[in-house]
Image (cartoon, rainbow, N blue to C red):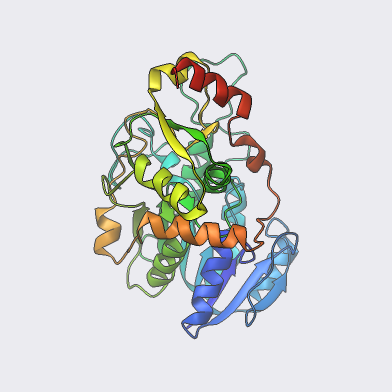
Amino acid sequence: MKILVLGGSWFLGRAVAQGALERGWEVTVFNRGRSGTVPEGARLVRGDRTVGADLARLAGEGGWDAVVDTSASEMAPREVLAAARPLEPVAGRYVYVYVSTVNAYRGWPAEPLTEDSELLDAPVDADAEYGRLPDDWDGPDWYYGKQKAGAERATTTVFGEERAVILRPGVILGPGEYVGRLPWWLTRAARGGRMIAPGAPDRSIQPVDVRDVAAFALDQATAGQGGAFNCVAPIGRETMSDLLTACALVTGGDAQLVWAPDKLLRDHGVQEWTELPLWRTSPGVWNVDSTRAQAAGLVCRPLAETVADTWSWLSGGGAPVEHPRWAEHGITPQKEAALLVALGR
């Protein structure tokens, strides 16, 4: 099996490349060389996917049985389209892993979702400004989702429904995470003491391990048909309490979970999703059906294993690639202390 990975040097892309090598596949990795490292054994082709000459040179290095695209999370639809076109003649299949693609659904995060839920509308040649809203807009912000939906359509336009596979992960965690959600919780738990835990302990959450998304992407690279799959953990299998309890356990500290109701957190201006990572109250956030993906072979390891392996990576000196989103996550000690006072704890 010969595979081309667009990206391939950090987090999901590196997990895909590493997983393919472990299967004995011949792996080519295409990236700019600005972040991370390519797994040993992969053939590296340097280039920029937004530069036509670089893409033409890459196509000349082919062909491949499949392309796995992990580097398009910040790309406009027209850039995805431009990259897919020269690769189509030299690749059998195209597996498009567009991180957080549940945003492509019109109903996210307000409604329960399946792969048959309505997608947002965007043309395949949309630029980076398509869907952007004015500063004074107070309605739903679908800019991010429209960009992703348009990029998905660009993929299927070039490769067709039978050769294109669309993977729609939600939150991806695990060793190498660059966003900072799970690392923040682990670092906070290691500090110990009374620790604010957001919302209800039994609230279902559905993060998926980066290695499980990578394995499923590789499985789909060899599948005989195209399609779209929600790559999230099963609904209701694990909870916020499971996550935070695991963080306290693996760090070996004396962290004591203090559960704060949603209303109190909102009243104190706590920012959902970022100040207390993974806390969000919209009813559809953690209600994404992945039955189709599970039937096709998606296996999600227990969340406690992801937590333990991420802590092992962090405490062993692991460091993510630098990314601006890391600084967005986590509540200040001062604000947490004020919340504990408000709870009378």
Q: Is residue 278 visible?
A: no
Q: Residue at x 52, y 48 (%)?
A: 253
Q: Residue at x 56, y 73 (%)?
A: 4
Apparent side of residue 2 relative to residue 333 in the rendered image (left or right): left
Q: Nearer the viewer, residue 111 or 179?
A: 179
Q: Residue 183 at x, y = what percent?
A: 56, 48
Q: Residue at x 62, y 35 (%)?
A: 328
Above or below 113: residue 223: below
Q: Residue 147 at x, y = what percent?
A: 53, 40
Above or below 338: residue 277: below
Q: Is residue 177 visible?
A: yes
Q: Residue at x 41, y 63 (%)?
A: 212
Above or below 42: residue 272: above
Q: Residue furthest bottom?
A: 24
Total count of labels: 0
Q: Residue 143 at x, y = what percent?
A: 53, 32
Q: Quadrant of the C terminus?
A: top left
Apparent side of residue 59 relative to residue 111 in the rendered image (left or right): right
Q: Residue 342 at x, y = what percent?
A: 47, 15
Apparent side of residue 220 relative to residue 195 in the rendered image (left or right): left
Above or below 140: residue 181: below
